[in-house]
Image (cartoon, coloured by chain):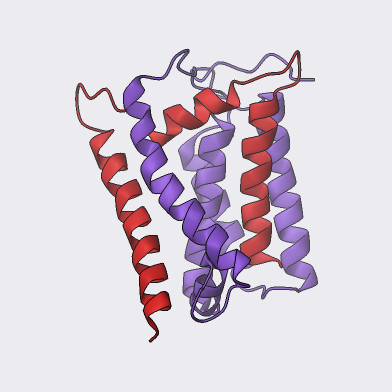
Chain colours: A red, B purple
Amino acid sequence: MSASRIITLSLFALAALGFAALGLLSRREGTRLPSLGDISAFVMDYRVGRVPVGRIALLGFWWWVGFHFFAR
Amino acid sequence: MDQQPAAAEVVRPWDRAIVMYPVFALIAVIGGTFGSFTLGAYVLVLAVGGTLFSLGLTGRAGRRPAPGVLPKAALWWLVPTLVFAITELYSFARHSTVDHPTVSLLADPFLDHYLARAAVYFGWLLAYWGLVRR
């Protein structure tokens, strides 16, 4: 296994651990750390005029994720 | 464009975990049987994704209220997000090789197994449902 592959895998693992750790910390009682769901809701609340840009972007992004992994 | 969403506490007969989770499990069980680049896979992802996209946009499913302001602690989420995004973009720019794999390349052998594919499909649907209800 090459060094660049090990570094790449380590960085992905580090990011995954970071998400998991923050997810757990955000569930603690009295924490000021918002959950990923709260952040998603905040982003999805973003509008330009009457157009729910944030909602379209996040829902569209997740649709694309499914398409990318399960169909393409 | 966006009609008034139903409040989260207004639960429609179908808008509850005991109804939706088995439906998602059934979709995942079926979706797991379709390999990539097959007509079934395209149709299912487009149909299910389109339905959830539409539900999320129109607010027909109940929504939980969004926080008006995020505390500064929210910035901590940027750390793993940036580590992931920079690694993925760098690998993508290097044409996603064995030495510089993207998540797609790493996931492909895993998703070749039916149970893994169905489980990830189920996770994708649950997360999508979570977004729809936000």
Q: Quadrant of residue B129?
A: top right
Residue A50 x/y as whole percent: 76, 14
In the image, farthest residue toward the bottom? A1
Residue A7 shown left or right of residue B7 in the figure? left
Q: Is residue B123 visible?
A: no
Q: Quadrant of residue A26?
A: top left
State the residue at coordinates (64%, 39%).
Answer: A59
Residue A37 x/y as whole percent: 44, 33
Q: In this orientation, which residue lies closer to the viewer: B43 or A2?
A: A2
Q: In this orientation, which residue lies closer to the viewer: B119 or A2?
A: A2
The answer to whether residue A36 is above or below residue B115 is: above
Residue A12 shown left or right of residue B28 in the figure? left
Residue A30 shown left or right of residue B117 in the figure? left
Residue B115 x/y as whole percent: 48, 73
In the image, farthest residue toward the left? A29
Q: In this orientation, which residue lies closer to the viewer: B131 or B86?
A: B86
Residue A52 x/y as whole percent: 70, 23
State the residue at coordinates (80%, 20%).
Answer: B1
Q: Is residue A23 visible?
A: yes
State the residue at coordinates (50%, 47%).
Answer: B126
State the residue at coordinates (51%, 81%).
Answer: B98
